[in-house]
Image (tube, rainbow, N blue to C red):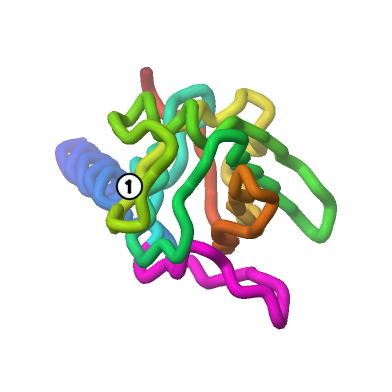
Amino acid sequence: MKFFAAVAALALVAVANAQSPAFTSCAAAGVTPELTITSFTLSPYPLCIGQPVTASGTGVLSAPVTAGAKLAIIGRYLGRVVYTDNQDLCTLTAAAGLPCPIATTATAITASVLVKTSAPADVPVALQVSATNGNGNLLFCQAATVTATNCPV
């Protein structure tokens, strides 16, 4: 019995310490994003359904992030859209202490969103996180395969 308790504890620690998956750019060919991402992470990972997740991106801004910037999240499983969310990026960054306009001197942008209860649990989802600036230009597009789970509250 102690053996099973120890294995369960180790599994819980492994899940709690899981690292964010590696994200890659999903910007269309010929499109230069206004934010060149050097690092993009999600925390906590795996994502917890019904709880906030914080996305952190570091990189170089070639234009200020302006009012009207939008964040779009799309998740696909077996090619079908299984998750969508759209948010005002400036509202999210202001909540993290960085209101718009965000100057080109900023090197990190952080935003937290609630993982909707409609998120599929325990399946690999191809996630695309993109943002459009207030001027309509692409700020960034990042993609990775992620998993969401029902975490204890």
How far across and how far down the image is residue 21, in percent? Answer: 43, 62
Residue 14 horizontal side relative to residue 144, left or right: left
Q: Residue at x 61, y 35 (%)?
A: 68
Of residues 40 and 102, which is closer to you in this image? Answer: 102
Residue 23 horizontal side relative to residue 102, left or right: right
Q: How many marks?
A: 1
How far across and how far down the image is residue 17, in percent? Answer: 25, 50
Q: Is residue 145 visible?
A: no
Q: Residues within 10 Å of mark 1 (few under 14, many from 20)?
A: few
- Residue tagged by mark 1? 15
Residue 134 horizontal side relative to residue 106, left or right: right
**Residue 40 painted magenta:** no
Q: Is residue 26 above or below residue 116?
A: below
How far across and how far down the image is residue 44, in percent? Answer: 35, 41
Quadrant of the frame with the C terminus: top left
Which amino acid, by three-letter code, is at mark 1?
A: Val
Q: Residue at x 67, y 35 (%)?
A: 85
**Residue 28 painted magenta:** yes
Query: Dot 1 lies on which element?
Result: helix
Of residues 145 and 98, which is closer to you in this image? Answer: 98
Q: Is residue 8 above or below residue 78?
A: above
Q: Residue furthest bottom?
A: 30
Q: Residue at x 65, y 43 (%)?
A: 72
How far across and how far down the image is residue 97, in percent? Answer: 29, 30
**Quadrant of res 32:** bottom right
Q: Is residue 142 above or below residue 53?
A: below
- Give the residues in magenta: 23-39
Quadrant of the frame with the N terminus: top left
